[in-house]
Image: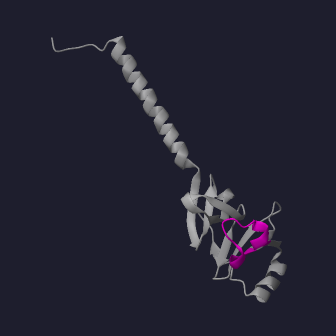
Amino acid sequence: MGDSVAGPRSMRGSLLGSIAFLILAVTLSSCFAGEVKNQKIDGPYRLIAIDSSQDMSISYALDKGDAIGRIGPTVLSYGFNQDYIVGMTKDSHGVAQYFYIVRSLDGPYVDPSVSVHGPFSTKAFAVETVRLKLPRVDHATSL
């Protein structure tokens, strides 16, 4: 007599529990699935990719985990020193473009047009590098 057969009521409860678990799992995974990379560069600057490496950008970190984009998307390499953050991207034709951020002019509420300069061609960026003593663009980005 110890055998019991699950009736429609217990099956329905089990099914509802499974559906609730599935909804919770999907909801939680979607909250964390978007950010692929969030790596500190220096100070408030971070290398951030959302969804894929195609979205890699250099951003200025704000309080509470938010950030404001500065260079990118698709930063392929970067460099930094106490005065500048530099980054290299490629345009839609695959041509290298260079940017630099003047750190002393940047801040959480600064319009990027004030502190971010570029795009520069490889040749023009070489001139800026000598003129301003910009750091080398020698850190490759990867996931």
The magenta stretch spans residue 38? no
Viewer-closest of 138 and 62:
62
Residue 128 sits in which quadrant?
bottom right
Q: Position of residue 112 (x, y in %)?
A: 75, 67
Q: Position of residue 72 (x, y in %)?
A: 72, 63
Residue 76 sits in which quadrant?
bottom right
Picture residue at 59% right of the left edge, 50% below the top: 34
Which image quarter holds the N terminus?
A: top left
Left/right of residue 43 with respect to residue 109 in the rendered view: left
Picture residue at 63% right of the left edge, 68% below the top: 141
In the image, farthest residue toward the front: 109
Q: Position of residue 26 (x, y in %)?
A: 51, 38
Viewer-closest of 70 and 2:
70
Viewer-closest of 101 and 26:
101
Task: Determine whether 16 is above or below 110 in the image.
Answer: above
Left/right of residue 7 with respect to residue 18 in the rendered view: left
Picture residue at 72% right of the left edge, 83% below the top: 134
The magenta stretch spans residue 111? yes
Q: Which residues lie in the magenta part?
A: 100-117
Picture residue at 67% right of the left edge, 71% below the top: 77
Q: Position of residue 105 (x, y in %)?
A: 72, 76
Q: Is residue 116 visible?
A: no
Which image quarter holds the C terminus?
A: bottom right
